[in-house]
Amino acid sequence: MAKKQAIAIIPARMGATRFPGKPLASDTGLPMIVHVCQQAAKAASVANVVVATDSIEIVRAVKAHGHDAVMTGAHHDNGTSRLAEAVRTMGLRDSQPIVNVQGDEPEIDPHIIDAALLALTTRQQPPNTTPLRLGTVASPMTDPSQHNDPNIVKVVTGLIEPDTATAQALYFSRAPIPYDRDHNAAARPLRHVGIYAYSGMALTHYAGLPPTPLEQAEKLEQLRWLEHGLPIQAAIRNTTHQGIDTPEQYQAFVQRYKDANAHR
C-alpha cells in the first residue's frame, strides 16, 4: 500500500493502572500521545491520524497540536473495541483501511505502520475469500530473556513469503513459543508488535464477536480473531521499540528524546 489512504486511529485512556494519566505525560515538552500522533503521521500509507478516547483532556491536548480526535465511551475493555466505536462515529466506509496504533508507543517506526498495512493487502486470496482479515507485525527477538517473559507476547507463523516477508500467524501466547525441544534453532522466536491493520468492515465485525476461551486465558485480544477462524497475516520486520507501561520506562524515553534533540 504505497498511497496515503489509510487512517491511523490511536486508542487512548487516562486510567492505566501502572501509569495513570500517561497519555498526557509531557516531560519532553509534548504530551506522549502527541509524540505517537507525530510518528503515525510520518507513515507513507497514512492519510490522517485520529485519537479515540474517553477523555476530554486528551481530546484538547491532541487538537491543540493539530491532530484530530473523537470521543468514545468509557466501557471498552480493549483498544479494538474503542476503535470500532470511533469508526461508527466517524461514518467510515466498509472498505476504509485502518491501522490501530498503540497510544503508548511514542517511538514507533513509521515503517512498522506501513508494514502492518502491507501485510493486510499483500497475500493473494482465492475467489470469494472473506475480506475479514487482519494485518500485524512480528519481530525477531534479539534478547533471549524475552522468550520467557510473560509480558512479551510471542507469535508463531507459517512459512514466510520471500517477496513480501509476510507469513500467516498461527498462534499468539505469553508463553515461550515455539518450544525448541532439541535446541537446534530450527524456528526463530518472534515477538509480536502490537499493531493491527484492517478494513472498516473487519473492525466492525470483530466488535460483534463474543469473547473466546483462549483470548480470556491469555488476555490477548487477537486470539478472538483466530478462534473465530479469521486469518491474520504478519509482516516480519526488525524493530526494537516497545510500549511505555511504567513511569520508569517513560523517564527512559524522555532521556532518549532529550539526548537525540540536544544538538538540534
Image (cartoon, grey):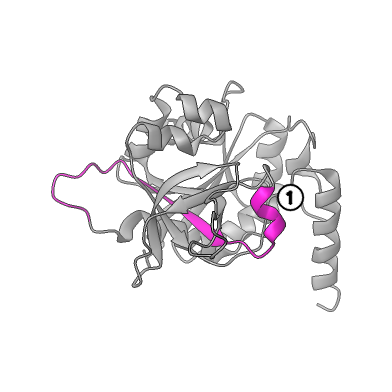
User: Could you say where residue 94 lies in the image, as x and y percent from the top left?
Assistant: 30, 40
Q: Residues within 10 Å of mark 1 (few under 14, many from 20)?
A: many
Total marks placed: 1
Q: Residue at x 51, y 66 (%)?
A: 237
Q: Secondary structure at mark 1?
A: helix
Residue highlighted by disc 1: 32
Place residue 160 in its image quadrant. bottom left
Magenta-tinted stretch: 125-148
Residue 203 in percent (x, y) is at: 40, 37
State whether residue 91 appears in this view: no
Question: Residue 62 at x, y = what percent?
Answer: 66, 45
137 is within the stretch colored magenta: yes
- Seen as rendered, the residue at the extreme front is 182
Judged left or right of residue 223, residue 231 is left
Q: Residue at x 60, y 47 (%)?
A: 176
Q: Residue sitting at 35 percent across and 38 percent down?
A: 202
Residue at (47, 66) in percent of width and height: 44
Work out which quarter of the rendered image holds the N terminus and state it: bottom left
Which residue is nearer to you in this view: 106 or 245? 245
Quarter of the view holding residue 212: top left
- The amino acid pointed to by label 1 is Met
